[in-house]
Image: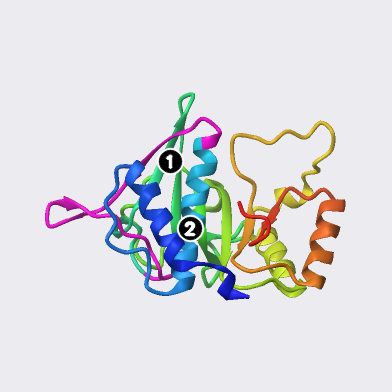
Amino acid sequence: MGYLFDQKKCQSDLKNFFAKEKVSINSLGSKVNQTFEANVFAATIRWYESKGWRTTIVSPFVNGNSQFKLKFNTRGRPSNYSYAVCEKNGERCQIRHQLRVSTSSFNPTNSKPANICCDVAVTRDVDVDFYGTGDALPNGDLISFAEAKHMSAFAELVASFVGLVHELKPAHLKKVRNRRWKLGDHIPPFLSLSGTMQGTATGLAETIEHRKIDIDIYSFDNPV
């Protein structure tokens, strides 16, 4: 169902959005999945702005000029790419694209690193400019994250996302959206799909809703 996602229109909308953010854009990705990732990145920024956060785009300098650049690869130093800084009531956080993050159970004494590259990561306002391509953000500095998939969903994909939440932010699987639950200042972990929800995916999403798990799933019919 990838044809449901209109890449040209999305690129035009994104250019208009980032123009309002006072950013000049050269590229939003040549591949459709890259444009969709950029769209989810922008949607996360919009979410924070809708909650009263003031956002600023920070971009690397190239030949003395600030150049907006998203990270359409799991490799690369974070300092070479753009990100958003959000501020509200003295609190600051960052929204980054394709940032590597250590899992919640990783221990530095492990023989090998255990980390995952998040399509979109909401982090504490920490300095990662010195990070190399393989360095990972400590899990304690991760606030939330999003997965962007240019495809329609089946049950296994939804289950895989639940697994990612278990590895990165397991506390959200224990939170219960009961009558006393209130949406906080930060976006819950979410899966965003360019396509539609298939029957089994819808069924699994319904069980997540019934269990009141603190995560969200968005699709073409239910965008962020």
| Residue that appears at 58% across and 62% down | 147
Q: Over which residues does the magenta segment extend?
A: 50-75
Q: Nearer the viewer, residue 95 or 51?
A: 51
Q: Residues within 10 Å of mark 1 (few under 14, many from 20)?
A: some
- Which type of secondary structure does the marked residue at label 2 adopt? helix
Q: What is the CA distance from the residue labelled 2 to the residue labelled 1?
A: 22 Å
> Would you name the residue on which mark 2 appears?
39
Give the image quarter of residue 164.
Answer: bottom right
Under mark 1, the amino acid is Asp
Under mark 2, the amino acid is Asn
- Which type of secondary structure does the marked residue at label 1 adopt? loop
Q: x and y percent of residue 144 in the render?
A: 58, 49
Image quarter in which the N terminus is found = bottom right
Q: x and y percent of residue 40 in the render?
A: 52, 57
Q: x and y percent of residue 133 in the render?
A: 36, 67
Side (left or right) of 146 relative to 210:
left
> Would you name the residue on which mark 1 appears?
125
Give the image quarter of residue 146.
Answer: bottom right
Of tags 2 and 1, which is closer to the observer?
Answer: 2
Q: Nearer the viewer, residue 126 or 45?
A: 45
